[in-house]
Image (cartoon, coloured by chain):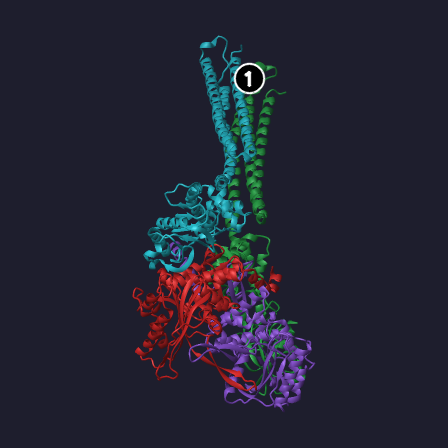
Chain colours: A red, B purple, C green, D cyan
Amino acid sequence: MAIKHVIIHVVKRDNDGEGLSKQLRNNENSTEGMTAQLTDGLLELFSNAHLNIGEFGVDGDNEVEPAFEQKLNKYYDDECKCSDFVALTKELANKYESVIVGDQLHTVKGGYLVFYHYERNDDDWLAVAILNKTEGIDVAADLEVVASEILDLKKLHLGAAINLTQWKSELSTRYVRFRTGLAAEVRDYFEKFIGCQRDKLAATVETKKLKSAIQDYAKNACGMDDDVVSQKVAQAHDYIKEQQKLGNQVQLSHVSNHVFPDRADEFTRQAREIHDLPEELAIDGKVLKSYKKLSGRGKGIAISFDRDMLNTTVKYDDGELTFSEIPDSLRAAIEEELKDDLGKDN
Amino acid sequence: MAIKHVIIHVVKRDNDGEGLSKQLRNNENSTEGMTAQLTDGLLELFSNAHLNIGEFGVDGDNEVEPAFEQKLNKYYDDECKCSDFVALTKELANKYESVIVGDQLHTVKGGYLVFYHYERNDDDWLAVAILNKTEGIDVAADLEVVASEILDLKKLHLGAAINLTQWKSELSTRYVRFRTGLAAEVRDYFEKFIGCQRDKLAATVETKKLKSAIQDYAKNACGMDDDVVSQKVAQAHDYIKEQQKLGNQVQLSHVSNHVFPDRADEFTRQAREIHDLPEELAIDGKVLKSYKKLSGRGKGIAISFDRDMLNTTVKYDDGELTFSEIPDSLRAAIEEELKDDLGKDN
Amino acid sequence: MSTEILDAYALVLAALEKKELQDGEFKGWLRLTPQLKDKLELLAGEELTTGSYDLIRDGKPLSSANLSQLKQAHFQNNIRFHVELTAQKIKSDYAICSEWNELLANELRVKSPVKYIFFTNTMTLLTPDCKDEKYVNYLNVHKAYEFVKELAESTEGGDSTIFYERPLRFEFILNESDLDCSIDLDALQKLLSKDLHKEAITCLMCRELVSFLKDNASKQRFSYLIQHMDSLVSNVLLSYQSYVENYTFDKVRKEYLEKRTEYVSKIHGVFDNIATKLLSLPAGIWFATTQIKEVEIGGLETMAFVKNVSVVSTVVVLAVLLIVNLIGQFSTISIMSKEYRGVFDSLAKTYEDEASEIGKAEDDIKSAQAKVEFKLYVAIGATLFLVGLTIWMFCEAYNW
Amino acid sequence: MSTEILDAYALVLAALEKKELQDGEFKGWLRLTPQLKDKLELLAGEELTTGSYDLIRDGKPLSSANLSQLKQAHFQNNIRFHVELTAQKIKSDYAICSEWNELLANELRVKSPVKYIFFTNTMTLLTPDCKDEKYVNYLNVHKAYEFVKELAESTEGGDSTIFYERPLRFEFILNESDLDCSIDLDALQKLLSKDLHKEAITCLMCRELVSFLKDNASKQRFSYLIQHMDSLVSNVLLSYQSYVENYTFDKVRKEYLEKRTEYVSKIHGVFDNIATKLLSLPAGIWFATTQIKEVEIGGLETMAFVKNVSVVSTVVVLAVLLIVNLIGQFSTISIMSKEYRGVFDSLAKTYEDEASEIGKAEDDIKSAQAKVEFKLYVAIGATLFLVGLTIWMFCEAYNW
């Protein structure tokens, strides 16, 4: 993972309603020295953020090339080499400005547009992050408290990263990762700037990838045995069903919290990076069946079991459910509960 | 919630093995102006940190007053008014230095000792946080990247907060909240500095409080109905049982993640602030029974149900468990699964 | 021990201020006294309370405390502990619950009653020396369960299903109102403990139970049974009585009485058959009387002598034939006797209680047989006598 | 339709490169062709595969794709899709699983067999036109289930528990080896469908099943039943036969005892019948005694002589008639003897255990026969004697 090019432009206003101030650099920022800390931060940015995943397209049509994609096409060759990184990013920064100005978005503050091209897992990526400064405090030599400003690299509010390799291959519909914030207005203008849209058939992919992500993580990262791995899948299934019942959006970080409460962040990160999962998961009912679980909760009862146990160790008869085998821990708990009676009656 | 006094002393070394530099202020920091941002940060510090809870004591004996407590006794009257905040904190800072020097801890770096006295829910608190500076980056006017330093208020590495009101009342064994870090060496020296120890009978209190915290949050903050509240308790029970089986420490944030995956941080915060729960929960088996759940998972099955359902709607007979009523969602799922056979055979 | 626990519970529950029931627990504020502390420790030992409570001073929240960590300061007047008590606990040695219905919904406690009970709704404590009618009836309810269980087990239906033409499954749960009925199963138990007709009794009890309860839902069955126990008992008794009657009269008595009549008339028929023939003998004698003539001494070659000889011989032959015939009847009778003895022996063996009656019937036949045999002997005697008479006449004719 | 699905499954499974079985799914790399894409779409419709796959180009991971979004580029030679196939799916119309044992562990599919089967271990496809022995037997296994179910239902035990003295619960699961046995229940079905003895047949089948299977665990019972079906069938048939015989047994006993009495009295009746006729002989003699007159020497032409001759002749004729009659009785008896011997022999042969009893009854009849024959000889003797006497009288009348 290495940053090959990085450049900072700025398009921002300090207060609502003021004019936009624009300042474009004419040469790339160095990736040496102080900037090394920036590049570390930049690489982390997308790993820790809640992202959506999609492709270029306009109004749901991925055959149409949005402006952003056309610029990329202009500067990137088939080997993902950029003919002129500075010129490309300048054109994109101007495009950014024109989106804000054209749509008369007087409350959009803009910020530092950091463009960077990096390589990860042999794939070339181009990312743009819109960053702002944050105010901190420092302690002066006399131990008095003084103000201090830094670029907020902890949180990505707006940004997009394009997997150029996949994009060029034309085999993928999931090569843009983007974060657009929650406010509809911000979301809209930024998606318009990038020209990206969510993958329409995401549900199948994501439901499936979530399962493999859980299995993969439970098995390889946590070293759990098959029974526990299967329980993790069951918990995810249970949680997703529950959220669907409530009509809630299923979120990756929530699934992580529920399934791997003690390693939630690590799992979320892996699911994002390795399994290309976005924060807002689209769930496909058919693929969810491939979790091979049956589960339900209510009336003081929560039950989940493997689908293929039905008719073998689990029997259903007219509303009555019988388990001929139960987990040892449960059996122990029940027998403990009944012990004075079991001892007496039998 | 308001900070009444705040003062910053510094006892630190820049590199391992160097001598400690000490600088003590002779007057309190102002709580106005720039420091307001500090105080906001300070108040948040303990809310967001993973804390332990305990009382003053030496080697497990809470009858013995450690040095820290003796200093408090010296300066605080029964109404929790401090006779000389600056003198108190100076003595404590010197005590801090002597602990490090006395124990020849050459790797302990020390830092900015921020002492502050604040009021929360009518209780008076004295807190000490050991903070360090963190390096950030800033963007200069020419869009070059430059270094910038701020005091790291996002994370509490070492610190303690004493509820003076409870401490004075002599009715509590849970008036010190402290964070000591994970490394044993750091842990030891800081606990020695404060003279605090974990409440020996914490398990009963914490197991009970966790249950009420969950019920309270589910009912009042999330507006869940009784059945769902009971499910949340069941999930906590299930998770705790699982962790106990694995021999793991039960952690508050993990319980939060599992039980309230979508509002984990908010719940954790409430559990800490309102219900006085520490991060590392001590669990008492007897009190855990008051969760009134039976649960177990394994062999592809996970089951949990209300304890008082046994012998009424749930029957156990020689290893076989029969539910005469099951959740609607599960019944629907099973009947869907069996539909081609149900339609044919019956 | 159970009494102490329930007493402590009652005391603490009564002492709770601003008591409310929440999530299966009574919660309220308690001003602690050393006595209450002891009670709470007892309850904590039974897991009826956690033993760790939040406390307030002058209405202001102030930490929490464990029972075992209390200091003198905790007993101050202005301090209240937020104590929770488990609202329901149903164990084998004691039960705490809101009311009868809660207890009676627990099958285990219906099958095997708990002796020490505390009802939180009414703050009532029930112990074995208590005369409360419902309580007394409750303690007896398990007898009804055991009765059902005994029947169920005899039909191989486990402890809760009676198989008799159809399966009749019970759920042993009740309602409070069911406890107004006293449980008196003595009559049924007595019947069940009879050695005689054991299977038949079980069977007819099952039949009665099934027809009595088949229209009730399985959840209501036991309750209905308890409520209508009297009418079940009388049904069973009636049914048993009519069974006993049906059993002897129709099947056995009729049979052996018929057999008796049949055999008696058959046996009498044996003599009747021969009687007509016997009448020919006097005729022969009369003839002999007219024909035998006096014969002089030495006149052995006379016609008269020959005639006399032939008359006597004929009579003798006649007599011999008759006697042979009569003796033949004995074997007929003995065959019959073999047959009826066999029949009655097997009857007597099958129906032992009826053995004496059957014996009497058999005796009737035996006496009929004896009479007929006696008549046959008389007939043989009479024949021999008449033959003798004829021979005497024959001899007299020669004045020897 | 089911065939198409299974064909597609087999095709895709065979095409998978580096195939491995993981978490109930076959996973492997597939070089996609338009044909395979169609198959995959069919399988995705059946939820046998998700329809969305990761793909690699030249061994390097490269995004993922949905079947419905494929472009021409996806069919390139250097691209592989990571396809997963559900390894087990057992539905009512088709089943995919590793082998017989997996299918046979599913009760539902034993009770109600699935016609289209694909075994992934052996890559075998079974369809109704397939002659595989195990497959044919599998399709018949449900008959055995239905047989058990019919019996279970008749004992009110639902579809899986036969109550006969004890409950005999079945779990309808099998092992592959059980399918080596062919299921032939025709004999039992035929028996069950009989109108006669319907209840008794059900009952004795239950009894046989219980005694046959009671020592097996409920999980093995059905399997054991299938394996030992032949011996069960013959047990049931034997049991039925002996039932039918036992059924008449009591009747038989009664029958031969009655026959004995009947024959004995019939045989005695033979002599009784003739006895009356015998009484006419003495009468004849008496008549002769009165009628035979002395006749002087040479008075052969006298009336008296003629009368005497005619008297003697009449007596002789009478005697001859009687003797003929008596001798006739012998053949009657021998006919009877033939008859009862036949009856008792066949009885003795049918009921061997009763043979000695039957023999005794026969002996009773034989002794009656002997007695009667003796009496007949006596009667013949007596007749000849009386005739002799008459002739002697006749001669004496002439003083020869």
Residue D304: image x %, image y %? 46, 14
Residue D230: image x %, image y %? 48, 40
Identify the residue at the far top of this view. Answer: D298
Q: Would you say residue D228 is visible in this rendering?
A: yes
Quarter location, residue A66: bottom left
Q: Nearer the viewer, residue A67 or B271?
A: A67
Residue B309: image x %, image y %? 52, 67
Identify whether C67 is placed above or below C346: below
Q: Nearer the viewer, residue D82 or A339?
A: D82
Identify whether D85 is placed above or below B118: above
Quarter location, residue D133: top left
Residue C125: image x %, image y %? 60, 75
Q: Would you say residue B198 is visible in this rendering?
A: no
Which residue lies under the disc numbered 1?
Answer: C306
Mark 1: which amino acid? Val
Mark 1 neighbour class, 10 Å CA radius: few under 14, some 14 to 19, many 20 or more: many
Q: Nearer the viewer, residue C12 or C53?
A: C53
- Asked which secondary structure carries label 1, the reply is helix
Left or right: B69 as drawn, with respect to D235: right
